[in-house]
Image (spheres, rainbow, N blue to C red):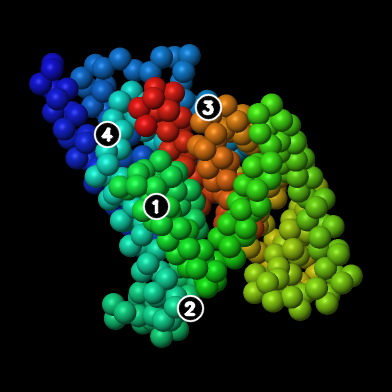
Amino acid sequence: MLQNVNKQELVSQVFIGSFVFLFPVIAILFPRSLAYIAFLPGVFLFVCQSVNRIPLYQSHNIPLFVKVVLIWIGVCAFNIIFSSFPDESSARTLKVSLLIIAAAFGCIGYTNYSYSLKIRERLLLYAGLFLSISIIAIELTCDLPLARMVGYEGNNLKPHIYNRSLVAVVLLAFPILYFLLNHKFDGISKTALLIICFIALLFYTVSISWSQSAQLALICAVCAGLIFWLFRGKSERYFWLILKITIIAVILCAPIIGKLLFSYIIEHPEMLDNYILKKGAAAPRLEIWSALSDLIRQKPVLGHGIGTTRELVVPSDNVYWKQETILHPHNFAIQIWLELGLIGVVAISFLFWHIMSFIEKIPERLLRLIALLNFLAWLTISAVGYGMWQSWWVGLSLSLLLFYMLMNKAIQKNSV
């Protein structure tokens, strides 16, 4: 048995060490594959532990993912029954469910394993992300999309081909920044220089990109960090209470907010001359939110069914949006309201409340801050960027949650 465990340890270290380096590179070059690689090390460990009959995690400490699986299955099963397009809802539910279940098994595998990142593996992690950001920075600066460089038909490609990669970079940058802040490179001055270079490179790359989602995420994170810095000691609990209530209130009122914002744009069209709003296609996006709010009123409690947004005809006046259908609303709250109704909104609000409570209880203030900024950056991108059920987005989101659960566990054991 001991020999088997030692073999498991060796194989696990090689597997996870390789994964640590490859994850950032894959996130940049193949961001859509995140859904399929994010939990492989944890699932691998779970299988090894089961084969070797290693005791699993204590039941009273079952990871949040297991609870999420139960809530997800319950909400989706009920939703499919009343879906406007049951076949589409069933297919989408199955696809996302496989990712969530894989994340749950992966999380159990990780939490039963005492492995932590060694110095050499952290260096590989830094090198992987630095290299990825540098490639994108050079590409955007010189207007040389990677596809054009390798000989594909890249003459008509624009810099937005890196938008998904930059979103992945921004979200991955937070945990890596935490590692940097806790890593001493032969003195404080060298560590500070490396951190400054990392932040400067990241901000430069995002600022020259076409990814306004990534830009807004960084702006939101910086502002939230400044506000969080003002709350210390016992006063911090008021920050968390206000934050929780505000986020939940915005989710609950999302359809109303969408209608009001579009009405304001109609009454003040001069606002659309703003460069940022014009570049971000704010007008058609707000029209979509307003039109979908009308669809939400048709089935406010049960919703139209998960994954049915692309099947629904958008009841807009086609002022700025000239098509009858959309792929997704570019707003997670509107999409939850539309597809899962009030039941889904209550479930997602419950989940977000628990995620924020989990972050609030992280004992180390630095990790608590980094986790908060990461969550708010993710929330910002979800509010203006991608669809909730895109596989790569679900995979990246669950990967980030996994990281903070594992880092919190490591800190509690004083192993970081």
Give the residue displayed 52% in from the left and 71% down from the top. Answer: 209
Mark 4 vs mark 2, CA separation in Å:
39 Å
As rendered, which of 161 and 342 lies closer to the eye? 161
Identify the disc placed on residue 395: none
Residue under label 2, please give it: 158
Say what secondary structure mark 2 lies in. Answer: loop
CB-based contact (under 8 Å), mark 2 and mark 1: no
Tag in front: 3 or 4: 3
Residue 328 appears anywhere in the view = no
Location of the C terminus (image quadrant): top left
Residue 412 appears anywhere in the view = yes
Residue under label 3, please give it: 363
Mark 1 vs mark 3, CA separation in Å:
27 Å
Q: Residues within 10 Å of mark 3 (few under 14, many from 20)?
A: few
Q: Which of marks 4 and 2 is nearer the N terminus?
A: 4
23 lies above or below 365? below
Mark 1 vs mark 4, CA separation in Å:
39 Å
Question: Residue 27 location in percent, x, y?
Answer: 38, 56
Q: Earlier in the sequence, mark 2 or mark 3?
A: 2
Give the residue displayed 48% in from the left and 68% down from the top. Answer: 205
Residue under label 1, please give it: 189
Q: How crowded is mark 2: few (under 14 residues within 10 Å), some or many (20 or more)?
A: few
Residue at the limit of the structure toward the left, as seen here: 3
CB-based contact (under 8 Å), mark 2 and mark 3: no
Mark 2 vs mark 1, CA separation in Å:
39 Å
Q: Say which amino acid is labelled 1.
A: Ser
Tag in front: 2 or 3: 3
Tag in front: 1 or 3: 1
Q: Which of marks 1 and 3 is nearer the N terminus?
A: 1
Identify the disc placed on residue 44: 4
CB-based contact (under 8 Å), mark 1 and mark 3: no
